[in-house]
Image (cartoon, coloured by chain):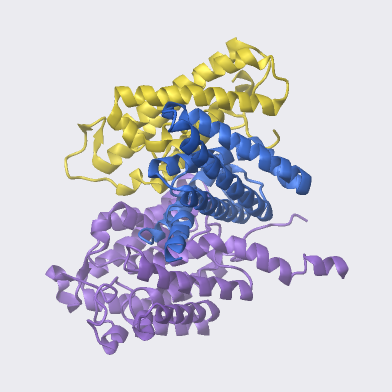
Amino acid sequence: MKLNLSPAPHVHTNQSTRTLMRNVLIALLPCAVAGVGFFGFNALMVLVVSTFSAVAAEYLWQAATRQKVRVGDLSAAVTGLILGLNLPATAPLWMVAIGSAFAVVIVKGLFGGLGDNFVNPALAARAMLLASWPQYMTRWYAPAGLAAVDAVTTATPLSNPGGFTTLQLILGSIPGSVGEVCKIAILLGFAWMLYTKTVTWRIPVVMVASTAVFSLAFGNNPLTAVLSGGLLFGAVFMATDYATCPMTAVGQIVYAALAGLLVAVIRKFSDYPEGVTYAILLMNVASPVIDHFITRRVYGHGKEAKNG
Amino acid sequence: MTRTLLFLVSCVFTQNFVFARLLGSSALFDEDRRVETALGLGLVTAVIMTLASVGCWALDRYALTPMKAEYLRVLAYVAVSLIAAVLVGLCLKAAFPKLNDALNEAGMLIAVNCAALGVALLNAEAGYGIADAALHGLFGGLGFMLAITLMAGVQERIKYSHIPEPMKGLPITLISASLMALAFMGFMGIA
Amino acid sequence: MAKWNDSPLFRLALAACAALVAATNAVNGLTLGLATGCVLVLSGAVAALLDNFIADEKGRVVLFMVISAVFAGIAQMIVKAVCGGTAAALGIYLPMIAVNCLLLARPADENGVGPAVSDGVKQALGFICLVTLLGALRELMDVGTVFGAQVLPKGLQLTAMAALPAGGLLLLGLLAGLANLIKPKRSGKEDEAA
């Protein structure tokens, strides 16, 4: 019998991947709707282009490399949508398309496809876009509803703490990237994913708690810290990506706790106002090492096994 | 104390020797290195870098500058790094022979010398005193350790990935390093 | 040495990797490439001459390092004298040639000066081309010029990331993948001919 080794997620058929991805897409819908509601037509275009480009890029890549085309499993659509939701509504559409292609081809495709990437594709693409075109990644619209075509650009809650009420932060009538602003929408999505057992509660809960604790330690209001920026969105939709987080429960807790710490540190001390992207990426990079040390103990490959 | 802490953060994260400065980057390209070996090699490198930093500083202070022989600097520094590496190697051979074997693999040896020479040159450029030079070597080495350990983990992870044939080996490692360097950019501005 | 892949292209890529921080535009790339190339060839020749006196393999590596350190020091002085600005831009990566040459150098054997020099020249040329190409591509993508000549419309910036180490690594990785696509890796004939 030939043993097939592969990293998580251990999905076996197109069908079960498709169900998983479909549930994620459903979970993302409230955020998408809220985002378009607040930021208007531009936001809608960003989402459409990001999703479409991702699917197209994956189709072309799989066709060009003569693999079985699996865009039907919806994983590219998910990656594309998540990337779009991570971008400001002011993002130029050509940039969005490049980002999606990068995520799907370079971060995922070159490593072998679904489940083979070691960093979150949407986040890596976002970091790449930020490094390549910082001037386009940091212009934020104030929410002005569907007529936001010539809206004013302004500062986000992270750059302007205290400029918004808690209610505004929760509802999302604040500047920010398309999907991150409406916390209620995010929580609705989270609830759906918990209900369909698509993600574990562990990572988002621990990461948010950790960020709150460390933000407090660094002298900021923990509630504001949790409700500002992309923390909630990142903790729920990106830190939980099975391919890029540790496989054990303990490992996941360590991963999420450290991610929260990094968010607080990067927000407080670095040049960037937001730390979630890099915090999660860094923990993605560290997650194999976490797995290396924590999995071993759990499965008894250490000293205990020699005695037993 | 804060200054030392900031210096540590700068050397290990913000200006990581491998991901930001690409000094000793050739150490990233061993596909079969185990995580524990990487940790050990990293520590050894930190020791070598610290010794080299101090040695080069002393050489600069007491020999090169008084004799106005700055033109000999490259040669002198390389010599000191070599000596540091050999000395540490001898100690290693006695105490941890397997680690010594790992160290002596061609790629690793060159990388270590790269890092040691690099930090010594950086110290000279910045005009550090002996304490800062030593710390730079130590902290830089810790950053090196972090980098190659993380890479060992990533290599372990992608071992079971279905990497397309042309990308296998060096290309995918370079891409991985690129993504890791991208992630490390998150520390920009901290210290 | 067991795991060290002796393929010349591999060595080339590794050495280019070490040069990535400095080779951010065509001029820097070319200068670094030329300097490295000269040091490599000269060191290889001298080392081959002296090789016969040293039997131990590690001893040979040490010998090569010392020789290339001498030549690298000289190269640094020459570059500083000829184009000080570029020397300043290259920073410590110019003297680092001393160690980077080792990455390019063929593992020592007893075949004498001739093969050592010819291998050195081949590697040097390859390196010069690779690093200059990388520099040029990165310069093109970052500021739209090549060797200072404006190629892309002014104000159009392809991507700022190209000038960063992460971008350089990505570019090198893609080039390496492309090279593998064009020329299948591990073709035995190629390794023996090198």
**Residue B20: percent from the left, percent from the top?**
43, 49
**Residue B186: percent from the left, percent from the top?**
40, 60
Residue A198 shows in this picture = no
Residue A26 shows in this picture = yes
For the C terminus of chain B, which image quadrant? bottom left
Q: Quadrant of residue A304?
A: bottom right
Q: Which chain is purple?
A: A
Q: Residue at the spot x=17%, y=45% of the render?
A: C155
Q: Which residue, as the protein is rendered here, is positioned at the far right?
A: A307
Horizontal side of residue B126 vs C190, given as left or right: left
The foreground one among A27 and A281 is A281
Q: Residue at the spot x=66%, y=37% of the render?
A: B86
Q: Which chain is blue?
A: B
Question: Above or below — where is B70 with respect to A178?
Answer: above
Question: Above or below — where is C165 with respect to A74?
Answer: above
**Residue A155: percent from the left, percent from the top?**
21, 72
**Residue B112: percent from the left, percent from the top?**
58, 41
Numbered-mark total: 0
Horizontal side of residue A153 vs B169, given as left or right: left
Q: Which residue, as the protein is rendered here, is positioned at the far top?
A: C114
Q: Which residue, as the protein is rendered here, is positioned at the far bottom?
A: A167
Q: Quadrant of residue B168?
A: top right
Q: Which chain is yellow?
A: C
